[in-house]
Amino acid sequence: MAKRNFRKSLIESDDFAQYSLRATFFVRKLRSLTLWEAINHVNDLTEASKGFSWRDRKTWGIEAESWDIVRRKKVNPLLIFCHPRVLSEQPRLLLYYRTVNLISQKGLSTLVGGNVTNIEAGRVESLDRTWLTKVVITLNSIASAVVKHSAEIDPQDLPGFQFATAGSTIQGSWNNAIGAAGEAAVRTILVNHLRNEVVQLVWRDGSMTRYDSDQHTSVLDRIDDLRVLRLKPGFHILFGSEPDVSMRDPNDVPVVAVEVKAGADPAAALERLGAAMKSFENDRDLNPRVKTVYVVRCMTPELQKRINQGSFFDHTFALSDLLLDESRQKTFANLFLRVIFRKQKRS
């Protein structure tokens, strides 16, 4: 009994909602960085290390003392130092050398300029020679300092450096994306529970892919980019704003609308309530009978009182419940499924 009571109080706490959202946000962002892929590519490079000459290493920012330490410890220099030909041939491996030197994207951009994000994402095919020289010298100068001032340097330590760097970057993103994280959590729940009804996915760039259950994990990795879910038999779910989620029938009439408010400040809870009520206006104009769903992270006693008195929404869910309670997730998803199944029975 004590364990059940503790779990119930845990789920209902605002801190739990915050840390659950943060954890899922970190997982998605970390997967999107493809850091392990970059690490594996550089490890593969070591098999061809004889093809990379280090004769000009001094001009690339590599200090003699640091070079000697790396060689003495029999560490392949490609794992530590950035050879200009590596970035020239594979620009996206900038991700590896930036993170192994514990420098953020913003920090590197401040030092050398350039669009570091696009390069690491593989959207840049060739690098300007002058910029390449600057970034190689910068990275190798930092690497030299780290090697020289560290008591030990071991290849097994390097992924730790890299994921620490990635974590710091993601934390910065998290500080600006708490609201978006709540929306992403709701999208994930819907995709998970409606997967048998999904036909096609439309992304924010306008591209479309046919849903394949074998690729379900990759869909969740891109959940922030999802714009439309096309469902059977002709329903579709729009992800946007005002409201955050809108399921529409084949005639494009909204039938279920969801607004997510993931803000944590109790003082602003009533303000968020007003914003949520306003967000449903567009869908209510199109269909006064649309079912409205309010998902809120911070449920204060006063907010609960206002919601109960005003009957503003057809359904209200606490975000913390949806994050952990499978039965609440099913209840939430069934609001959509019931409409779909009702339509199927009529057809």
Image (cartoon, rainbow, N blue to C red):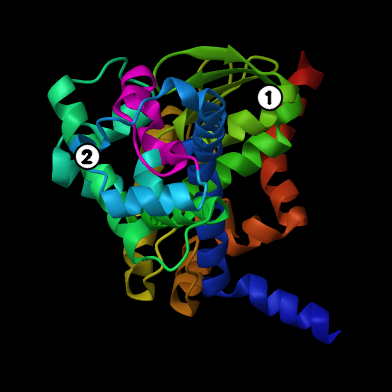
Name the side, left or right, on which 201 lies relative to 338.
left
Rendered residue at 75%/54% (across/down) = 326
User: Extreme right residue here?
Assistant: 1
Rendered residue at 15%/45% (across/down) = 111
Residue 261, image x and y in percent?
Answer: 43, 55
**Which amino acid lies under the numbered mark 1 shown in the image of this protein?**
Gln
Label number found at residue 82: none
Query: Under tag 2, what secondary structure?
Result: helix
**Which amino acid lies under the numbered mark 2 shown in the image of this protein?**
Lys
- Name which of mark 1 and mark 2 comes first in the sequence: 2
Q: Residue under circle 1?
A: 215
Camera sees residue 117: yes
Give the extent of the magenta segment. 76-96
- When the figure is inspected, residue 76 is found, relative to residue 313, above or below; the finding is above
- When the figure is inspected, residue 123 is found, relative to residue 64, above or below; the finding is above
Quarter the C terminus occupies = top right
Q: How many marks?
A: 2
Query: Under tag 1, what secondary structure?
Result: helix
Name the side, left or right, on which 80 lies relative to 254.
left
Give the overall secondary structure of the magenta segment: helix
Camera sees residue 177: no
Name the side, left or right, on which 223 lies relative to 69.
right
Residue 242, image x and y in percent?
Answer: 37, 39
Camera-side residue of 196 and 153? 153
Rendered residue at 65%/70% (across/down) = 11
Q: Residue under circle 2?
A: 58
Query: Which of labels 1 and 2 is toward the front?
Result: 2
